[in-house]
Each structure stands twice: as structure tokens, then as C-alpha cells.
Amino acid sequence: MKPGKTGIARIIAAAGYSWQGLSAAYQHEAAFRQELILGLFLVPLAIWLGVTGLESALMIASLFVILIAEIINSALEAVVDRIGSEHHELSGRAKDMGSAAVFLAMVNAAVVWIFILFT
């Protein structure tokens, strides 16, 4: 068994794989692109509207959670689609749950922004 990369080489390789994943999400997932563009407008707004650094950080973090959920949902959908194109109840359930995760991330962001801006 050949040992894998260690130390800084492993970190550099992992960063490369992460960049490939972000690139794939941007290239192949319209929802990710839309959420990313929305985030590009909302991050400066969060910095401007947040009274404290913590408020701005929470608002920005809630936007990153949406992107994270979208990438996980897209990865799950890709795996399900790779397995087969025929309809299967479990495949549909998995895709629906991934979509629900994105929806909950969006609800979370809305709640965070509402609490910070209106309380």
C-alpha cells in the first residue's frame, strides 16, 4: 500500500481538490452561481448594516452556510444521478432532503438577518 501525501503536500493537494470542487459548482450549478452573486451583494451590506463585528460576522456566516449546503446538495445529486437514471424512491428522497437542507440554510439566513436588523 502506497502511503498518501503528508504534511504541507497533503494540505496543498487538499486545497487543490477544494478549488476544483468550487470551480465545478460554479461551472455546473446555476443555483450556486445565483447564491454566490447574491452573496457578493449581501456581504458588503452585512458589513455596512452590522452594528458590531459579531453582527456582521453572523450575517456573513449565514450566507456561507447557504453556499455550503448548496455544494453538499449538488454533490449528493451528482452521486445519485451517477448511480442511475431510473426513478427510485430513495433517490428522490435523498435529492429532496438535500434540497431541504438548502431551504433550511436560507431560512436560517433570513432569521439571522431579521433578528440583527429588526431587534
Image: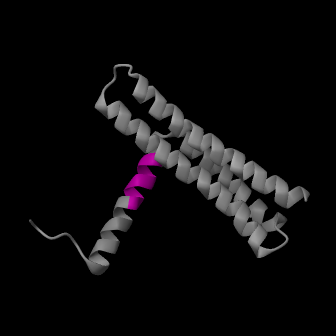
Which quadrant is the C terminus positioned in? bottom right
Residue 64 screen position, x and y as percent: 61, 57
Q: Is residue 34 highlighted in magenta?
A: no
Can you name the residue that lies furthest to the right here?
119
Please determine whether, in this image, residue 2 is positioned above or below residue 119. below
Q: Which residue lies at the image location 41% right of the left edge and 48% below the top edge?
A: 24
Determine whether 85 is above or below 57 in the image. above
Applied colour scheme? one colour
- The percent coordinates of residue 3 (x first, y second) are 15, 70
Give residue 12's position: percent from left, percent from top.
33, 72
Residue at 45% over, 44% down: 27
Residue situated furthest left in the rendering: 1
Image quarter in which the N terminus is found: bottom left
Examine the residues drawn in magenta and state their main secondary structure. Answer: helix
- Residue that lies at the very extreme toward the top in this rendered image: 87
Q: Quadrant of residue 62?
A: bottom right
Is 27 situated left or right of 43 in this image?
left
Q: Nearer the viewer, residue 108 or 48?
A: 108
Q: Looking at the image, which residue is at 76% across and 62% down?
A: 46
- The quarter holding residue 99 reads top right
Whole-percent x, y for residue 45 in the image:
78, 60
Name the residue rendered at 35%, 64% in the picture.
Answer: 16
Specify the segment rendered in magenta.
18-25
